[in-house]
Image: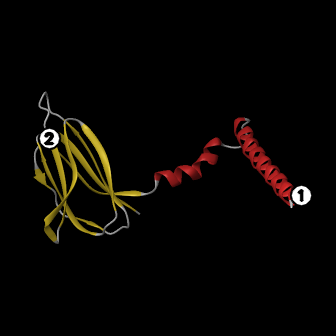
Amino acid sequence: MQIKIFISFFILIITLLGCNETRREAVNRAFNGEASSSNIAEGNEEKIKLHWNKIYNLKGTKSKKSKVFKITGKEWKISWKTNPQKNKEGEFILLLRDKRNKSDAEIIANVTGADEDTRYLNSKGNYYLVVNTNQNYEITVEELK
């Protein structure tokens, strides 16, 4: 029984060493000009970036209601950034409303002063935003494709 464990452990160590050598060789080739370092990282960057399509953008300094926008994908996000106007730090409230159910509102942001954040959502439908503020703001709605 101990021999089987030893052999399994030995094979694991050999495998791990082999994997580390392969990674080291790839890095060495990249530094020696034999392979492009951008090609090695390119696949990972694609996974990180994902493909977000801009659906709606809203900028302003006053309270307003957005136009209705349609979400058809599995995941989407609302990114927002707000800054006070000259020495007028105020509140920034951002609500999300479903066109079908106007009585319910989801609070996306409720902050005072400069701030920014992103909220991820995963529901389909027709929505609009309600902004209550006296600060500069920019809001972007993007859908994952």
Helix, strand or loop at label 2? It is: strand
Question: Total label count?
Answer: 2
Q: Is residue 41 left or right of residue 143?
A: right
Q: Is residue 103 left or right of residue 28?
A: left
Q: Amino acid at mark 2?
A: Glu
Q: What is the crowding at mark 2: few (fewer than 14 residues within 10 Å), some, or many (at least 20)?
A: some
Residue 28 image position (x, y, % from top left): 74, 38
The tag on residue 111 is none
Examine the rendered structure and indicate whether residue 98 appears above or below residue 31: below
Q: Give the quarter of the figure containing the C terminus.
A: bottom left
Measure the C-alpha gap from mark 2 to mark 1: 70 Å
Observer-nearest residue: 47 or 107? 107
Q: Residue furthest front?
A: 1
Q: What is the crowding at mark 1: few (fewer than 14 residues within 10 Å), some, or many (at least 20)?
A: few
Residue 97 image position (x, y, % from top left): 18, 62
* Quarter residue 133 falls in: top left
Residue 50 image position (x, y, % from top left): 46, 56
The tag on residue 3 is 1
| Residue at (61% x, 44% y) in the render | 38
Observer-nearest residue: 105 or 6? 6
Q: Earlier in the sequence, mark 2 or mark 1?
A: 1
Q: What residue is pinned by disc 2?
A: 91
